[in-house]
Image: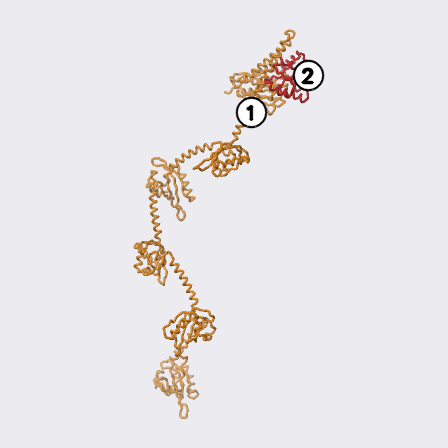
Chain colours: A orange, B red
Amino acid sequence: MGSRRAQNPDDSNLAQKYLDIEQAILIVINSDQTVGAINRKGCEILGYKKEEIIGKDWCDNFLPKRFREPTRSVLKKVVDGELKATEYHENPILTKSGEERLIAWHNSYLRGKNGEIISAVSSGEDITEKRAAEDALKESEEKFRVLADRSLEGIGMSQGNRIIFANKALVRLFGYRTAEELYQVPLLDGVAPESRHIIINIMEKNRRSLPVPHRFTYKLLRKSGEIRDVELSFSYVKIKGGEFTLSTFRDITEHRKAEEALATSEENYCTLVNQLTEGLVVAQGPRPRLVFANPALSRILGYSNKELLSFSPQKVVELIHPEDRKMFFSRFKARLEGKDVPSKYEFRGVRKDKKTIWVAISSRRIKYLDQPSVQATFTDITERKKAEGALRESEEKYRRLTENMNDVIYSIDPNGILTYISPSVRQYGFSADKMASHKFIEFILPEDVERVTKDFQRSLRTRTEFSTAFRVRTKKGRIYWVEDNGKFQYDRSGAPISLTGTLRDITERKMAEEQLRESEGKFRSIIESSHDLITLINRDGRVSYLSPACKKVIGWDPKLLIGKRPAIFHPDDNARVQSAINGALKGKGGVDLQYRIITQSGEERWVSHSWAPLFEGGKLRMVASVIQDMTSRKKAHEKLVHQKEQIAQLSRMKERFMADMTHELKTPLSVIMLNLEMAKKMDPVSQRDELKACFDLMWRNSVRLSRSVEQIMQLTKAESADLSTSRFHLIDLIGEVCEEYVPIATTKGIHFEVFGPDIEIEGNERLLAMAVSNLVSNAIKFTPHGRIKINWSSSGRNAVISVSDTGVGIRPQNLHKVFHKFFKEDHDSPGSGIGLAISADVITRMGGRMEFDSKPGKGSTFRIIIPKEVSK
Amino acid sequence: MKKILIIEDEPDVAETIKAYLEGAGYSAEYSLDPAKAVKDLNKFDLLLLDLIMPRFSGHQVLKEMKKGGIKKPVVVLSAVGLPGVISAELKRDYPGVLFVAKTAMHSELLPAIKKLIGQ
C-alpha cells in the first residue's frame, strides 16, 4: 500500500530540479505576465514551438479560461513579491490541442540588482496521470473500506500474534464490542483449544516457509467462551516492507449443522435406495450409460454395482433381451428427449448368468448431475410371469376339460344369443356349431320357456346367479332335464355383457325326484288327510312338522307351534307329558299317552298320543307322533254308555211292558174269572138278572182281553206289516174305531165328539185304523172324565185326523219321549206304552207323520197327517 | 157289617169286586177317583186298592194315607206280572198291607179280608 499523498518537493531539492530540467516545465513569466522563456519540456507539454510561446500572455494563451483571472492575480502577487517563492500550487494548462493538463507548480523569482522582482520563474510538473491514479486509488480505498465494514464475512489483518485490523463483522464474530478491544487479544486466545494445534501448525510451517493450506476450518473461541465453526482463508501481504496476514472468516456453524442434517438425510435416502427391492437405475444417453444403480438392481441382473456403472453402451444394450431391445431403447431415447412414451411396461432382461428374466419397468425423465437422465425402477416379475404362464396352461387345461366333460358350458350375449357352447352339447343331440348364433331359448321345451325367462329376468334384476332347470327334447324325441347355473358378466358401467353358465343333465335326478315326489305325495296325502295329528319333533324338542289336522285335533294354529317347544299341556298333565317327551328324545317310544291339551281358545281337550323315535345312523333324528282327538273316542264311549243305558232302560221298559201287558191281560181275565166264580153259585132262574150282568161283564172283558192280545200281535206285526193299499173312506174307518170305544168311554162318563168331511184315502186301511184306535184308546185311558173330540179334514194333498182329549196331558220334560216305544208318563200309568210308538211307526211308513200338543191337566191333541194318495 | 172301599179305575173290575164282596156279606163301595176317595176313607173298615191307575196311583194313595196318619187295613190288588218285586217294595214301606193278585181274587181275596177285619 502506498502513502496517501505525493511528497512536496522541499527547498533542498530545488537545485536538483533545475538540473533535472528536462523533467519539468521551466517557465519565466515577465512582470507583464508575458512568457519570457520556456524550456523544451514546457514546449513539449504545451505542444507549441518555443517562438509561438515567447512574448505571449501566459494567462490568455496557455491557461483554461476558468483559471485565467485567478492565475493573473496570483501571478501579480508573485511579481509583487506577495507570495512566497516556495509556495506550491496545482494549476492546469491548456495545450495547443485544447487538452488540459494538471501541473504542480513551484514558484521562485528572478530579482534585479536592486533586489526588485523582474520575473517569476515557475517550474511545473505534469501530474495529470499521477493525480488520476491517485483519485482512482482513493476511490478504490473508499470502496474497500466500505466493503470491509459492511461485509458479513469477518475480515482481519494480523501481524505476529495480534490482530491489527478487524471489520465490524469480525468484531461481532469474536463477540467483542469494539475493534480496539479485539486488538488487545492475543491471536491464539481467539481459538478453541481443540483447534489451536491447527493454527500453531500453520504458523510454524509459515515461519519455515513450508507450503500451508490457505483455507481451513477451525473452531473459534468467542469472548463469551462459545465455540463457532469457522472457515478461514488467508493470504500474506507486504505493506511498506511489513508482512501482514490478511484473513477472511466465515461462520459455518449453521452451515455445518445443515450439512450434517443433509448428510443424515442423504444417508437415509441412500439406505432407502440401497434397501429397495426394486432395482433403481439412472441412465444417461443417447448412447446408454448407467450412472447410478442400487444394490437391488445388482441382485436382479446379477452384476455388481461396479460392473454395472462401468458398462459400455454396448454392454448396457446387452442387458436387454434381443427381442425387446428395439422397443426398450427407442423408448429410452424418446424419453431422454422429453417425448411422451409409455412409462410403465414389461420387458425381458438378460442376467449375467444368461438367464432371461421378466422385468416391469417404471421410468421417468429427470436431471441428474445436470444431465438429462432416465430414472427407472425395475421389478423382477419372472415369478409372476411364470404363474401367468401356469395360469394360461391351467386355463388351457380347463378349456380342454370343459370341452370333454359332460357338463355343457355356454355363453350368451344380452340378447340371449349363444356366443359359445361347448361341443359336449352333442349329448343332447345338438351340434354346437349349429346352435351358435341361435337364441338359447329355442332349444328349451316350450312349456318351460316362461319359467326360464322369469328366472333369467329375476337374476338379471337382482344381480344374483342365474339358476334354473328345464327340459330339452332331442331330435329323436327324448326328453332331458337340464340344470342351468350361470353368472352374468357386467361391463364397467354395470351393464350385463354376457351370461356364462353350465348345463348339467339331471334327468335321472328328476326322475328319482319325480318318483320320490309321487311316493312322498302318497304319504303326504295319507298324512294330510289323516284325522289324527301327525307331528315331527326335532332332536332339540322343537316341532318341525304338524299335519293339517292340527287345528282340528289340538285346537292350535300350526304356525304358532312350528319351530317351538310346545307349551300347550294342561297344568295337571304337564309333568307327565314332559317326562314322556324327554324319554322320546332319548329314544323311547310310547303308546296311547292320554292327557289334556289347553287349546288356543283356552278349552281343555283330551288327546291320545303315540310316538316313535326315528334314528339315522344310530343317532336320534326326530320323533314322529300321532295325536288323536279323544273327543270322538270319548263320544263313542259316551254313546256306548248311553246305548248301554238305553238298552238297560229298554230292558226295564220291556219288563214294565211285560208287567203292563200282564196287567192288561190279567185285569179283564180277573173280571171274567171273578164273575164266573160268582155265576157258578147263582141260580139261573132267581138270579137271572145278576147272572146276565155277570155274563155281560165276562163278554166285555173277553173282548178286551182279545184286543190286548191283538195289540201284542200288532207290536210284533206292525214292523213287518205289508203296506198293500186300498181305497177307503176315512169316515168309515173312524166310525168303526168309535164303535169299539164309545161303550168304554161312556162307562167312564166321557163324551165323544166325532165329525169330518168325506175324504177318500188310498192307503193301508188296517194300519191307519190301528193308529187311530191307539190314539183313541190313549185318550180314553188318560182322560178320567170330560170329552174326546175326533175330527178330520183335508189339507192339500194330506188328510189330517185329530184326536183331542181333556185328559191329564203330558209333562213338558216327557214330550220328546212320547213316540218312544214303551214310554209311559210314569210307572203306574196304564197301558203298555207301546200304542203311540206303534202308531207313529206305521204312519211314517205310510208316508205321513204324527204331531201333538199337550198341556198338563188340560189335555192333549194328537194329529195324524197322511197323504191322501200313495205317492208313486 | 164291615164296610169296604174299593179304589179301582176300571169300572168292570170295581163293579165285579163290589158284587163279589156283597155276595160274601160285606158292605162295599167303589171309587173310580182315588184322590177323592182317600178323603172318605175314615168311613170304611178296609180298603181294596188297585195299584195301577192313571194319574193317581195306588202307590200314591198309600203315601197319602201314611202322610195323613190314616191307619186302615189295606189289601192291594195287583194285576202285574211280577208281584214279588212290587210287593217287596211296598211291604217294606207299608208293613201290614196284604197283596192279592187280581187273577187270584176268587181264591185269595176273601181270606185276606177275613184275616184283616174278620167276617
Vertical relation: A70 (above or below) A568: below
Residue B50 located left or right of residue A135: right
Q: In the figure, B89 relative to A342: above or below?
A: above
Label 2: element kind: loop
Q: Amino acid at mark 1?
A: Glu
Q: Quadrant of the N terminus of chain A?
A: bottom left
Choose top left, top right, bottom left or bottom right for residue A710: top right
- How many marks the image carries: the answer is 2
Q: Which residue is mark 2?
A: B45
Query: Are labels 2 and 1 on one chain?
Result: no
Give me the residue at 40% from left, 40% from top: A468
Q: Is residue A361 above or below residue A398?
A: below
Q: Is residue B18 visible?
A: yes
Which residue was labeled with disc 1?
A: A645
On screen, residue A220 versus residue A689, left or right, reads left
Image coordinates of residue A208 in percent, x first then y, are 37, 75
Closer-to-camera residue (A772/A283) = A283
Label 1's element?
Answer: helix
The answer to whether A830 appears left or right of A202 in the picture is right
- Amino acid type, callout 2: Asp
Residue B110 relative to residue A553: left or right:
right
Q: CA distance from mark 2 to mark 1?
A: 45 Å
Q: Residue A242 occupies which quadrant of the picture?
A: bottom left
